[in-house]
Amino acid sequence: MSCRLNSEQLLDRWEKRRELQNLMVRFFSEDYLMRRENRMYAAYWSKAADVCLGVNNGYYQGAEAVKSYYLGLEARTRLESRLIQEKYPGRLAGMTEDQVYGAGVMDMKSLVAPVIEIAGDGATAKGIWTVHGMNTKLTPAGQVGCWERAYAAADFVREDGQWKVWHLLYVQDLDAPAGTSWAEAAPAYADDPVFAAVRDFQPPEPNVKVTVYETYRADRPFCAPPAYPVPYETFAETFSYGL
């Protein structure tokens, strides 16, 4: 920034930063854990036409594409819950689809090491967080505990006095079963017929197919993290985490 900020401006900047921190923790650390996939788009995303979600294998560009990503998460959870209810009828018998939703799986994402920059004009902001996660995935072999390391990097825009996600990168650096070496191939587990339908589930694909970020493997070339934000005055002066 070219000029020093006064106390009132610094307080405003601090309050906006706190709002961003709270937004991302609710988004990632709370709503993923609570399986609130069906509210994520409406709760956090901007109304802008060019919203964009980047994942390892491509971009969901535009509102309908981004919505489809979260609808896919919800559809997978409903499938997993139904299969887990079938596998463990003693504990889950008689429960409705909504009551059993999210049973037997877990997706915990802790956000650490934030770097946040509020634009000088206050209209936008940028931030990047490291994600340290642990989750229980449902595979054709059954439930498998996994470690996750990822980056969540976002452009935010101010709408009606609140921050909203405009462009988001959510790219996994590591996704590996717990108790194994992530430098080696994942172990092969015997399939469980109850969970066979998991193999056939196909989530909505990115509408822009491109390798955004490669997950770790023993022969992966060096892969730099998403760019970290630096101070800027207006969004026209900085880069975008979208396309």
Image (tube, rainbow, N blue to C red):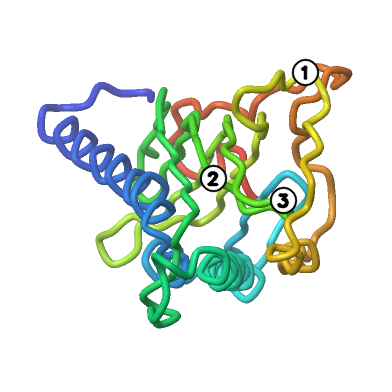
Q: In this figure, which residue is indicated by the disc labeled 2? A: 136
The quarter of the rendered structure image containing the N terminus is: top left
Residue 17 lies in quadrant: top left
Which circle's residue, 3 or 1, is located before the other in the chain? 3
Which circle's residue, 1 or 2, is located before the other in the chain? 2
| 75 sits left or right of 17 in the view | right
What numbered label is drawn on residue 183? 1
Give the mark toward the camera: 1 or 2. Answer: 2
User: Where 198 falls versus 114 (above or below)?
Assistant: below
Q: Residue furthest left?
A: 7
Instruction: Label 3, secondary structure: give it.
Output: loop
State the image coordinates of residue 57 (x, y, percent, origin top left).
Answer: 78, 49
Q: Nearer the viewer, residue 222 or 52?
A: 222
State the image coordinates of residue 36 (x, y, percent, origin top left).
Answer: 40, 64
State the image coordinates of residue 31 (x, y, percent, origin top left).
Answer: 38, 56
Is mark 3 in CB contact (under 8 Å) with mark 2? no
Instruction: Name the amino acid type tagged 2.
Output: Thr
Can residue 231 be seen at all in this image of the molecule? yes
Q: Residues within 10 Å of mark 2 (few under 14, many from 20)?
A: some
Marks 1/2: CA–CA distance? 20 Å
Q: In this figure, which residue is indicated by the disc labeled 3? A: 141
Instruction: Name the amino acid type tagged 3.
Output: Ala
